[in-house]
Structure formats: C-alpha cells, structure tokens
Image: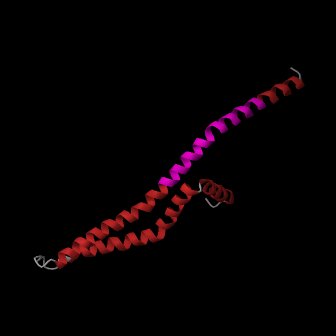
C-alpha cells in the first residue's frame, strides 16, 4: 500500500466515524437532556417536599397535644404536654429545613419547568467554571 492510499482510507474511515458519532449525537442527546431535566426536577421536588411534610406532621401532633391539654376530662398527670412538645420540636426542625434548603430547591424545580434552557446553560456554566 502506498502512503497516499493509506491516507485516503484513513480519511474515509475518520469521515465515517465522525458521521456515525454525529448521527448518534443527533438521535441520543435530546432524550438524555430531557431525562436529566426530569431527574433534577423530581430530585428538587423530593428534597423540597420532605421538610414540608414533616412540618405538617409536626403541626398535627402539636394540635393533638393542645387538644389534650384543653380537654377538661384529661387527667394524665402532666403527660398531656408531651405531644405538644414533640410537635413543637418537629415543627421547629422542619421550619429550619424549609428555610435552609427547600426555598432554593423549589426555585430550582420552578426554573426547570419554566426555563429549562436557562437551567441547562447555568449548569453547563457551573461545570465549565469548575463549581461542581
């Protein structure tokens, strides 16, 4: 084989490989991006909703404890305060969780649904900058 013939075969092989990669990218990249956006949306919703559910459960426990305290028929020798204290502690911890993490996660979920392209650009920018 001559060098020219070998170079021609190599160039043809590279062109075919590039075409195959391009076809694969055109066909597979959009579903991957869609799946990534769905994953990030549900991840943000999960971690945003968990403290809210804890807050609701704590509020129900607190309400039950307050009903026990106000009930004139209740004679538990001071134990009726326990559900109120437990409910208040759960509410306090859940509120801290909501304020610290859920606000940013809810913002992320809304951003993914309202402006997915902006979200993808910001994520790509963070990756390029080396933040993540």
User: Based on the displayed image, in which of its 4 quarters is residue 123 positioned?
Assistant: bottom right
Q: Position of residue 27 (x, y in %)?
A: 63, 36
* Percent coordinates x, y for residue 75 in the rendering: 11, 77
Q: Residue furthest front?
A: 114
Left or right, 37 with reference to 128: left
Q: Is residue 48 above or below residue 42?
A: below
Measuring 52% from the left and 49% from the top, which residue is drawn there?
38
**Relative to residue 131, is residue 25 depicted above or below?**
above
Q: Quadrant of residue 85?
A: bottom left
Q: Could you tell me which quadrant the C terminus lies in?
A: bottom right
In the image, the segment drawn in magenta is 14-42
Give the vertical position of 125 relative to 83 (above or below): above
Numbered label tally: 0
Residue 5 visible (yes or no)? yes
Residue in view at x 18 percent, y 79 percent: 70
Q: Is residue 82 visible?
A: no
Residue at the image point whose x is 58% and y is 42% from the top: 31
Say above or below: 106 vs 30: below
The colour scheme used to paint the residues is secondary structure
Q: Quadrant of residue 4?
A: top right
Horizontal placement of 67 versus 27: left or right? left
Does residue 24 belong to the magenta stretch?
yes
Q: Which secondary structure dominates the residues rendered in magenta?
A: helix
Q: Residue furthest top?
A: 1
User: Is 80 inside the magenta-drawn segment?
Assistant: no
Instruction: Quarter of the image for the N terminus: give it.
Output: top right
Give the x, y percent position of residue 114. Answer: 56, 57
Q: Is residue 31 left or right of residue 65?
A: right
Viewer-closest of 26 and 20: 26
x%, y% of residue 79?
A: 17, 76
Q: Who's the residue at 47% across and 53% down the image?
A: 42
């Amino acid at each position: 084989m001559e060098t020219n013939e070998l170079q021609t075969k190599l160039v043809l092989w590279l062109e075919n490989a590039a075409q195959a990669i391009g076809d694969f990218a055109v066909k597979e990249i959009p579903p991957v991006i869609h799946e990534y956006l769905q994953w990030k949306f549900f991840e943000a919703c999960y971690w945003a909703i968990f403290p809210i559910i804890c807050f609701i459960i704590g509020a129900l426990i607190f309400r039950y404890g307050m009903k026990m305290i106000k009930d004139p028929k209740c004679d538990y020798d001071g134990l009726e305060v326990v559900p109120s204290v437990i409910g208040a502690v759960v509410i306090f911890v859940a509120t801290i969780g909501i304020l610290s993490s859920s606000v940013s996660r809810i913002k992320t979920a809304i951003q993914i649904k309202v402006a997915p392209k902006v979200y993808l650009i910001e994520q790509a920018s963070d990756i390029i900058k080396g933040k993540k």
